[in-house]
Amino acid sequence: MAVLFNVLLVFVSRVVSSTITPPPEPSGVLYNCVVENWGNGKETAGPCILCFAGDQGTFLERAVACSEQFLPTVSDVCSGVLTTAVAENQKSVEDVIECFDDTLENMTAERCLRIVPDNGDVVEVLAEGALCLTEARHNATLFIEHFLGVEEYSKIERKTFH
């Protein structure tokens, strides 16, 4: 039952997310920094973002170094693709990004499952779970934009498209 619930929660979140036009957003790996380094007294989301946003080395070199230092879950889950990826091979770099994204989705879904109360109404639990996922993405976006100082740029860009 738990596996079915997880699958349904991820499915509902993707459907809900795909119907909402996303704002201009920072790189996906920055979300890993916020999700894995948020709360419980951790203050490493900012240094993690700076590590990935830096211009030292290739993206792949930064992915290996920054995940080892700031993203222990991603580093563990993605260790296989991180060690076999080749910077000059676009497909292997895409595999690294996909692993980061998959890990981010799983971590966020697991967090939402922990905090959404199970009151027995499957539809309500799924709706609350989807809302939790959307709020997590929104809050992470706000943190990243504020940290990088791009919130004013995003507001101007959003007004242009409306």
Image (cartoon, grey):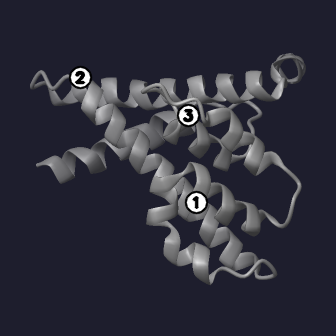
Crowd band around label 2 with a 10 angstrom C-alpha radius: few (<14), some (14–19), many (20+): some
Q: How many marks?
A: 3
Disc ID at residue 68: 1
Residue drawn at 74 percent across, 36 percent down:
25
Label 2, on which residue?
124
What amino acid is found at the position of numbered circle 3 in the picture?
Answer: Thr
In depth, the one of 43 and 95 nearer the eye is 43
Q: Earlier in the sequence, mark 3 or mark 2?
A: 3
Q: Quadrant of the C terminus?
A: top right
Residue 73 screen position, x and y as percent: 45, 54
Residue name at image x 45 percent, y 64 percent: 76
Name the mark on residue 156.
none
Residue wearing tag 3: 19
Q: Is residue 89 above or below residue 146?
A: below
Q: Is residue 90 above or below residue 133?
A: below
Sort mark 3 into few (<14), some (14-19) or many (20+) by Cα contacts within 10 Å.
Answer: few
